[in-house]
Amino acid sequence: MSDSIFTKIKNKEIPGNIVHEDDICFAIEDINPQAPVHVLIIPHKEIDKVSNASVEDISILGHLIYVSKKIAAKYNLNDNYRLTINNGAEAGQSVFHIHVHLLGGRSLNWPPG
């Protein structure tokens, strides 16, 4: 897999607002936000989609969820937020580098699609 748009943002090859970074992942504000807070949490390792993740990726995937809690607190979402992972083009995945959408800051309806 060539460097995704997310990796290019992380490497500062293209602009993006990085709001968190650690040794496993980084997070950016979505350029097309669907809620007042819309942050993407992305592993440094380029894994194209959840259905292609391996056993070796379990700790990475868990870390993404854990980091979402820290970012939600930073944005004062107070336990009221949604996490979404799209898997495949028909599910709405447009960048094939796993990422968790953290959405909040308003009431979110269900079902989403």
Image (cartoon, rainbow, N blue to C red):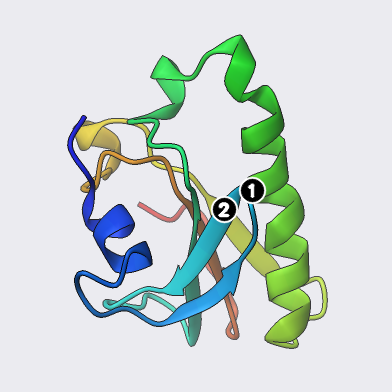
- Horizontal side of 74 relative to 111 (left or right) equals right
- Horizontal side of 80 relative to 108 (left or right) equals right
Q: What residue type is labelled 2?
A: Cys
Secondary structure beneath dot 2 equals strand
Secondary structure beneath dot 1 equals helix
Residue ID for mark 1: 64
Decide if residue 77 is in sight here.
no
Among numbered discs 1 and 2, the one appearing first in the sequence: 2
Residue ID for mark 2: 25
Q: Which amino acid does label 1 sit on?
A: Leu
Q: Is residue 76 above or below residue 102?
A: below
Mark 1 and mark 2 in contact? Answer it, CB < 8 Å: yes
Q: In this view, does 103 lie above or below 56?
A: below
- Residue drawn at x 37%, y 75% is 34
Rendering coords of residue 70 (x, y %): 77, 69
Decide if residue 44 is in sight here.
yes
Rendering coords of residue 39 (x, y %): 49, 71
Q: Residue 19's image quarter?
A: bottom right
Q: How many labels does the image show?
A: 2
Rendering coords of residue 107 (x, y %): 60, 79
Circle 2 packing at 10 Å, graded few (<14), some (14-19), many (20+), is some
- Horizontal side of 108 relative to 52 (left or right) equals right
Q: Residue 57's image quarter?
A: top right
Which of the pair 90/64 is nearer the observer? Answer: 64
Marks 1 and 2, how far apart in space?
Answer: 7 Å
Q: Residue 67's image quarter?
A: bottom right
The N terminus lies in quadrant: top left
Which of the pair 92/25 is nearer the observer? Answer: 25
- Residue drawn at x 64%, y 48% is 64
Q: Is residue 105 above or below residue 91?
A: below
Which of the pair 69/26 is nearer the observer? Answer: 26
User: Closer to the camera: disc 1 or disc 2?
Assistant: 2
